[in-house]
Image (cartoon, grey):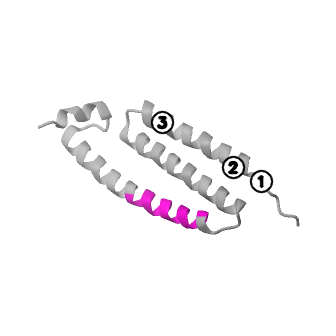
Amino acid sequence: MEAVVIPMEHGLALAAVLFSIGLVGVMVRRNIILILMSVEVMLNACGLAFIVAGARWSEPDGQIMFMLILSIAAAEVAVGLGLLLQIHRRVGSIDVDETSRLRG
């Protein structure tokens, strides 16, 4: 069975589209959970770009960077959900606009 080679431009274009979708999600959404999900999409798009670039030059550096991105994403989820729980306890909502009531 012959290996299918995807051109680098297609992989980078997909990464750019995914990053743009994530960026629009961060800018438009008001729900903290959806904002965190959009940040995850952006991180995965960056990881895809690293994987595509590493595959282009036959180097494992892209995969190593993707592992770093996965660990950062896991830490972001843990901290983000902890903050989300505290905001929900204090405000009673997970709307970003409602967090303005948290000012001392």
Amino acid type, residue under disc 3 in the picture = Gly
At label 2, counting other C-alpha atoms closer than 10 Å, the crowd grade (few under 14, some 14-19, many 20 or more) is: some
Distance between the alpha carbons at the discs numbered 1 and 3: 28 Å
61 vs 8, left or right, is left
Which dot marks residue 25?
A: 3
Q: Secondary structure at mark 1?
A: loop
52 vs 66, left or right, is right
The residue at which mark 2 appears reads as 11
Give yes or no for contact between labels 2 and 1 (Cβ–Cβ under 8 Å): yes
Q: Secondary structure at mark 3?
A: helix
Residue at the location (55% across, 67% down)?
Answer: 64
The residue at which mark 1 appears reads as 6
Give yes or no for contact between labels 3 and 2 (Cβ–Cβ under 8 Å): no
Amino acid type, residue under disc 2 in the picture = Gly
In the image, the segment drawn in magenta is 62-75
Distance between the alpha carbons at the discs numbered 2 and 1: 7 Å
Q: Nearer the viewer, residue 28 or 55?
A: 55
Q: Nearer the viewer, mark 1 or mark 3?
A: 1
Q: Earlier in the sequence, mark 3 or mark 2?
A: 2
In the image, residue 67 above or below residue 9: below
Q: Residue furthest front?
A: 57
Which dot marks residue 81?
A: none
Q: Nearer the viewer, residue 30 or 52?
A: 52
